[in-house]
Image (cartoon, rainbow, N blue to C red):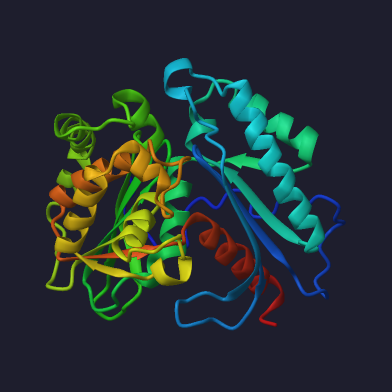
Amino acid sequence: MSSPDDLYNGPAGNLVSSVPGRSTYRPDETPTYAALDLGTNNCRLLIARPAHQDADGHGFRIIDSFSRIVRLGEGVSQTGRLGEAAIARTLEALEICRDKMKARGVTRARSIATEACRLANNGAEFVAGVKAKTELDLEIVDRETEARLAAAGCASLADPTAKAVLLFDIGGGSTEVIWLDRAASCASKKIRFWVSLPLGVVTLAERFGGIEVDDALFEKMADCVASELGDFIRGVADFGRCANFHLLGTSGTVTTIGGVFLNLPRYDRRRVDGLWMRDVEIDATVRKLRGMSYRERAANGCIGAERADLVLAGCAILEAIRRAFPAERVRIADRGLREGILMQLIAADRARTGPR
């Protein structure tokens, strides 16, 4: 857990990793940035160029992206190792990322791996294999770095009038919960307290099951998460709230809920990112998801077969957070670690060379 600090301070890791096919960055060229986030469930890439800061606080323009469910952490909670099939799937996705980075002429990049590689006793061996086969420098980041990057990428969506906001990132192998607060004279949010729960949609579904989830099983999952939240709840007990207090969520769970709530035939980031939902709307959408069969979830255009056995575990994590921190509103973010990485890379360049 962290003490009060600024969103952009704290361990930054290696902000620059080697870029396949590139020589050393030249300060006179227009930079192209890449942020790669290899999680327990997903492999995601964003490629961007700097731009004037937009209304959401971003100072970059996305020129390419990639996302694939690879389930790198499949079985790690039982075996303690990354499996051969998971590694093969992941390497295939990482090769696509490498090719995109080369094609776009990426000059500065940061590639991170999170909970699956942190937990696996062959995580370092996997990272070395990635380097040998793809030339990508994967950095296994600690939980604090993950929490700070998530906050950096999402905080611009927080209501500036709210005295405090609870940010959460439901991942495949862990869930980051972050208390954002603001000084009386400033609308920008700062991290006051955070925790990384050793539970995500993959680990929870592997422990309890995710295909057939009845009410009793759902409550067992929610109770399991609630037991991990105890220290965080006590840690923020004296922090002030206000009438505008709300939750801010980033993850496949909350974006799925947003897409299902909007009855989208297929997921549309433009419709979901930044969406406000009332607590009763969240309740109704989660009930709808819990009422679906596995086959119905797999057929839904906002879920799909690859996530049909994970989405209810994510809903149970969300339910535990909402019960611990009741709020009338939830804002949904389809952004997070990658955006936080891009912001850090661009800020570091601008601090060194000045704005372009």
Count of numbered tags? 0
Locate residue 168 relative to residue 89 in the image: left or right: left
Instruction: Kindly indicate the quadrant of the structure image that contains residue 234.
Output: top left
Please tell me which residue is depicted at 57% across the width and 63% down the height of the picture: 344
Vertical position of residue 196 compared to residue 212: above or below: below
Q: Residue 288 in the image: x percent, y percent?
A: 22, 51
Q: Residue 73 in the image: x percent, y percent?
A: 50, 30
Viewer-closest of 30 and 92: 92
Locate residue 286 relative to residue 339 in the image: left or right: left
Please tell me which residue is depicted at 51% across the width and 82% down the height of the picture: 54
Please tell me which residue is depicted at 75% across the width and 70% down the height of the picture: 31
Vertical position of residue 56 compared to residue 215: above or below: below
Instruction: Kindly indicate the quadrant of the structure image that contains residue 244.
Output: bottom left
Viewer-closest of 20 and 6: 20
Please tell me which residue is depicted at 55% across the width and 53% down the height of the picture: 12
Q: Is residue 47 in view from this perspective?
A: no
Q: Quadrant location of the N terminus?
A: top left
Locate residue 85 relative to residue 77 in the image: left or right: right
Q: Quadrant location of the C terminus?
A: bottom right
Locate residue 293 relative to residue 238 in the image: left or right: right
Vertical position of residue 117 compared to residue 185: above or below: above
Q: Is residue 32 in view from this perspective?
A: yes
Viewer-closest of 264 and 18: 264
Vertical position of residue 44 compared to residue 142: above or below: below
Instruction: Kindly indicate the quadrant of the structure image that contains residue 232.
Output: top left
Viewer-closest of 303 and 342: 303
Q: Residue 76 in the image: x percent, y percent?
A: 48, 23
Q: Residue 32 in the image: x percent, y percent?
A: 73, 67
